[in-house]
Image (cartoon, grey):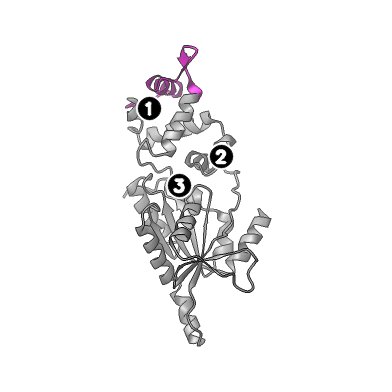
Amino acid sequence: MSKALREIEGKIKAVDVIIELLDARAPLSSINENLEDATQNKKKLVILSKIDLADDHQTKLWSEKLSQRYDKVLALDLTKESAEKEIAKAVNILGEEKREKDRKKGMKPQPIRAMILGIPNVGKSSLINRLASRKAAGVQNKPGFTRGEQWIKVSNDFELLDTPGVLPMSYENKDKATKLALLGSIKEEILPNSDLCMYLLKFLKEKYPNALSRFDINDIGDYLETMKHIAKRRGLIKAGEEDIEKAESLLLHEFKNGKLGKITLEWLLWR
């Protein structure tokens, strides 16, 4: 962790704006606290990603709450082309203070340089690739930067460092680890599928009681009976009995891919 932090900190010095992606389904668990200190002196744009899979009302509440903590918060569907324009606009606004300083020094304003950070499977790589492939070729390496780091010219006013690095996550907090495993941000193998499914069903019963209607389940009850019912509905039978393990894998897969509906695992109170 310390080595990864040093590498990130070295790259942070070269940028003006940090773009951090958080999964809208679990914004707090998506925050890598180890990066908070390293990036506190930089303008930060936080993007709630995967909003197509998250509870719309909760996404709105999280956007408002996080806006009190960060310079700018956007809730975006990163598969849409309009997301690029919104990101570029926000980066330019956050970079205006730097441009003003350049002007006061008699310097020609330079493009705002940004870095994208985020935990695995939050959309970071897809966004980088999208910006890189749709825009001009990478800018030449600049003096003083580590060899091999490339700057992508997103626009005349915006450059993106394409080697942000990924910090490993700490799994000491089981509740956080469980949520991230359910989202696919860390390997499910760190916890048994049965534990993940028990956690998920308990949460769904409390917050989204109709989430299993696709399995003709309108009242989530006993864990084993629920899993047996899912297995029967999907024909997951082994040696004449319901295959609970396959039913668990199926449930986790369908949740992760939004088949159970738009669900947020971290709730703020309803207004």
Amino acid type of disc 3? Ala
Q: Residues within 10 Å of mark 1 (few under 14, many from 20)?
A: some
Q: Which residue is mark 1?
A: 220
Q: Amino acid at mark 1?
A: Ile
Helix, strand or loop at label 3? It is loop
Q: CA distance from mark 2 to mark 1?
A: 26 Å
The span picked out in magenta is: 217-245
Q: Which residue is mark 3?
A: 26
Crowd band around label 2 with a 10 angstrom C-alpha radius: few (<14), some (14–19), many (20+) = some
Q: Nearer the viewer, mark 2 or mark 1?
A: 2
Query: Could you tell me which secondary element the residue under label 1 belongs to?
Result: loop
Q: Nearer the viewer, residue 138 or 160?
A: 138
Mark found first going from the N terminus, 3 or 2 = 3
Mark 3 to mark 1 CA distance (whole Å): 22 Å
| Residue 225 colored in magenta in the image | yes
- Residue positioned 51% across, 24% down in the render: 245
User: Is 132 covered by the magenta stretch?
Assistant: no
From the image, tell me which residue sits under label 2: 187
Q: Report whether 123 appears left or right of 174.
A: left
